[in-house]
Image (cartoon, rainbow, N blue to C red):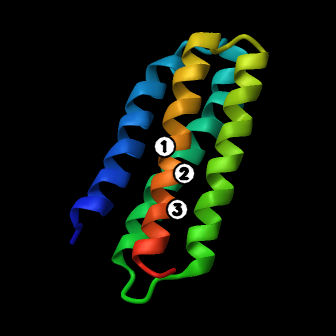
Amino acid sequence: MYNYNDLFLFQKTYDLVLWLHPILNRFPKSQKFVLAQRIENCLIEILEGLVKLNSQKFRSESLAEDLNVKIDRLRILVRLAKDLRFISIKSYGFFAERITEVGKLLGGFKKIKNI
């Protein structure tokens, strides 16, 4: 099902979900079902998109672009959480490094799969 590159991209994204989940649970009660939920939904959509992208016999450029848009949306939501002081600057820096890595891996995946 997965080759090594596909698994690496998925695993990096999955690890980011696991890392961010406890942080989202510490959001103020008023934001748990607003901003925190949107961030978590975006992360899950990205994971689901990676599974779908990998399982397609014929790679879809539109699906890969959709994943890029979701990654950008995630960046904005987490930046907003940082600016509202729900996420520390240190945690935001860690997140920014990891999501940039995921974006680069997705770009590499697109080149390898000729999307």
Q: Amino acid at mark 1?
A: Glu
Q: Is residue 32 above or below residue 3?
A: above
> CA gap, disc 3 to disc 1?
10 Å
Mark 1 crowd level (few <14, some 14–19, many ≥20, 10 Å Cα): some
Q: Amino acid at mark 3?
A: Gly
Residue 107 marker: 3
Residue to which mark 1 is pinned: 101
Tell me whether circle 2 and circle 3 mark residues in contact (CB < 8 Å): yes
Label 3 element class: helix
Q: Amino acid at mark 2?
A: Gly
| Residue at 21% across, 72% down | 1
Residue 103 marker: 2
Residue 41 locus on image (x, y percent): 57, 45
| Residue at 67% across, 38% down | 75
> CA gap, disc 1 to disc 2?
5 Å
Who is closer to the viewer here, 104 or 80?
104
Residue 77 locus on image (x, y percent): 71, 35
Label 2 element class: helix
Q: Which residue, as the protein is rendered here, is positioned at the far bottom?
A: 58
Mark 3 crowd level (few <14, some 14–19, many ≥20, 10 Å Cα): some
Dot 3 or dot 1: first in sequence order is: 1
